[in-house]
Image (cartoon, rainbow, N blue to C red):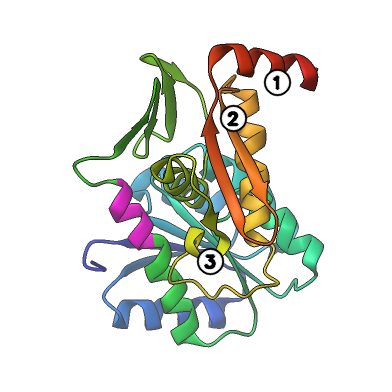
Amino acid sequence: MPGDAHILIVEDNLPLARGVARYLRSQGYSTALASGLVEFRTLFRSGGADLVLLDLNLGTDDGLTLAPELGLTAGVGLIIMTGRDDIHDRVRGLDAGADDYLIKPFAMDELAARVRAVLRRRVRASGSDSTLRLGPVELDQIRGELRCDGRAQKVTLTERQLDILHRLMAAAGDTVRRAELLPHEHWEPGDRSVDVHVSGIRRKLAAAGMDMLRISTVRSRGYRLDLLDAGVARIARTNAS
């Protein structure tokens, strides 16, 4: 799977960036380095990327401003790697569109595991049957797009958000445990990343007018997605306004 995956490393600590690039190349990935946002955009326009590893402190640049841009690009994963370990920074990073958040210093094998996890989701989403249907609603994981009765809705879901929504839709009204929403991850019971991603999905569904999809929190267990009929959705929309 690594074979043709291209990883763009945005990091102004050159020794660290070179070390990460050298290790990832030993794992079979191709890499490119950018020390700031201007250089990143030049490289991205010319060669694209399957995954971006992004530092938040880039001299005078704040790497977090790049996350929403990448969220608009279907199929590109994003892992933030930074020394900012405050919970508020983690929430901001995940909420801005990152698929994962890795605190420096980190072990290279942990970085590799997280890279593999994000790329696995990308490959799964690009499979031959990437569209999941629930009643009149279709989720296209390649385009990051929701459709209702064939009408496309503009959404900007990240790779991880797409994967979570896909799992909730596939469960069709059954509760999905938090741990099942982030498989093969370094998930622990106190990890808030699942809740942050679900909160982001809820906001984006509402913004896209997809109020027939309701994600409910099942206390101490996980989440459940229900498909509301037109009348219930209309009542829910009225109560929310």
| Main SS of residues in magenta | helix
**Of residues 135 and 114, the one drawn nearer to the viewer in this rendering:** 135
CA distance separating discs 3 and 1: 29 Å
Check if mark 3's residue and mark 1's residue have beta carbons within 8 Å: no
Q: Which of pointers 3 and 2 lies earlier in the amino acid sequence?
A: 3
Q: What's the residue at 64%, 24% (across, down)?
A: 207
Position of residue 113 in the picture relative to residue 95 (left or right): left
Check if mark 3's residue and mark 2's residue have beta carbons within 8 Å: no
Element class at badge 1: helix
Q: What's the residue at 29%, 53% (across, down)?
A: 124
Q: Which residues are magenta?
A: 119-125
Residue neighbourhood size for the residue with mark 3, other residues' Cα within 10 Å, grouped as few (<14), some (14–19), many (≥20): some
CA distance separating discs 3 and 2: 22 Å
What residue did someone put label 3 on? 179
The dot on residue 123 is: none
Residue neighbourhood size for the residue with mark 2, other residues' Cα within 10 Å, grouped as few (<14), some (14–19), many (≥20): many
What residue did someone put label 1 on? 236
Q: Is residue 124 magenta?
A: yes
